Image (cartoon, rainbow, N blue to C red):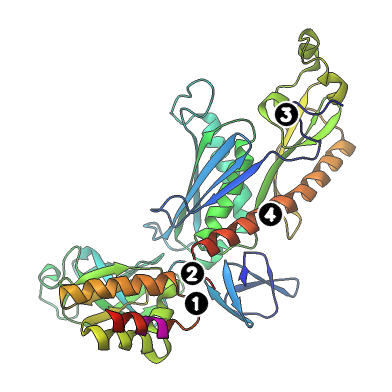
Amino acid sequence: MVKRFDGREYNELRKINIKSNVVDNARGSAIFSFGDTVALAAVYGPKPSKMSLDYEKAFLRVRYNMLTFSTPERKKPTPGRREIELSEVIKRALEPALLLEEIPGSIVDVYVEILNADAGTRTASINAASLALSLAGIPMKDLVVALAVGKIGEKIVVDLNKEEEDYDSEKLKKDHEKSKYIEYYGEGRATDIPVAIIPSEKKFTLIQLDGEISNKELNDALNLALEKALEIKNLMKSNILKHLSSDNFIY
Amino acid sequence: MILIPGDSLKKKDINSYERENNYYSKYILLLNEDKTTRLFGYYMPEVNDIVIGKVIDVLSNGWIIDINSPYVGKLSLKDIGTDPNDLYTYGDYILCQIVRMTKNKLIDLDIKKKEKLNDGLILKVDPARIPRLIGKNSSMLNLIKEYLKIDIIIGKNGRIYLNGNVNNVSKAVDIIRFIINNSYKRGLTEKVKEILENK
């Protein structure tokens, strides 16, 4: 029986790996990885701002950066349009979950570095950042969980990798070894939908769509995302508990 | 039991937020018989707190003090005519008390002890675990002071000042680290007493 390119089921996530408090200088930090996509997030602050204090909320600053060795070919280290855009996207995905009005006028800095990229860097970044924020003790409603869903050919799948993101049935027909996958995915191209969710409120804080998808299929995809988000959240939770008990300060 | 942000709580307290008449935790918390404690976090200033501040700026009429929190404090010069630099200058540690705080978190400080705290050791620890280091009716603090015979001043903002015999100070640092790392274990005071007796 033919399965996805890497042998997963349609609703199977890539292997998730979480490490907590990896950066000593930061107040909170975490590494989150979806398979080969690895994101490191570190949180600094809340620190005093020199700007006027006539604000009702704290400032959340996010910097997303891909390291030069994170892609197969060397990436230029200058932040380009993509990096600036993704920083803003991540910031807006995290902000609704944070209770920033409790520390008005201060600054919370989040730095996200992509150590290795294999599709889904923004979702891994959001997961890493929300873990790091909770470990830094920033007040928040819930952990933000992000994952990608999508339609490849005619099939709705979860957590796409790079190969699936670039899926094109026309191209695969020429490739003898891989033409068997058309049977599984169907004709067409890939549609990628990264989403971020506040699981307890079932609220979406990020939906982006790259490709084509019908209304009904989008609904199916989002429901699948909600279901899978709980799974990721439980993993995050068990990891935080494991980290805290390994620190051996808890009975 | 440890709670993470978004876990439901039975009743309202300072570590919870409300949504549709239910209460949820907003930090990583330790739940012990309906009582919640924060495991780590930043220091949030409150009126009457005694803190160890560091001078980060000298103004014509006072000083800007870093109190290891999201906000800076301001200490005003009271006797007019003296140069603020003669009293305290950049990098000096001083013991202050928070006297006023506005809604916009402008903090007014007052000097609690006139002498600078520059001659000792300043230790930085997690502010959320300071209450355990002081203990009930400052029992833990008195225990360390009694055994090692050194000066210890604890600021609520996570800075600790130690002064005295060098060997005893280094012993005290070890014990403080031990308390901070094991702050949520039961019977800590007895354990610390045991360690102090053996040293």
Q: Which segment did they paint magenta?
A: B189-193
Residue at 44%, 81% (x, y): give it: B188
- Give, as a three-letter code, the residue at label 3: Asp
Residue at 30%, 77% (x, y): give it: B109
User: Marks 2 and 1: in contact by CB < 8 Å?
Assistant: yes
Position of residue A205 in the picture relative to residue B140 (left or right): right
Give the number of the mark in front: 3 or 4. 3
- State whether discs 4 and 1 lie on one chain: no
- Give, as a three-letter code, the residue at label 2: Phe
User: Marks 4 and 3: in contact by CB < 8 Å?
Assistant: no
Q: Chain of mark 4?
A: A
Q: Nearer the viewer, residue A27 or A240?
A: A240
Residue receiving disc 2: A249
- Give, as a three-letter code, the residue at label 4: Lys
Residue at 64%, 41% (x, y): give it: A123
Circle 4 Cα neighbour tier, 10 Å, few/some/many (<14 / 14–19 / ≥20):
some
> In the rendering, at what x and y percent does residue A71 appear?
53, 26
> In the rendering, at what x and y percent does residue B41 appear?
47, 66
Residue receiving disc 3: A6
Q: Is residue B191 magenta?
A: yes
Q: Nearer the viewer, residue B93 or B62?
A: B93
Label annotation for residue A233: 4
- State whether discs 3 and 2 lie on one chain: yes
Give the number of the mark in front: 4 or 1. 1
Quadrant of the rendered image containing residue B193 = bottom left
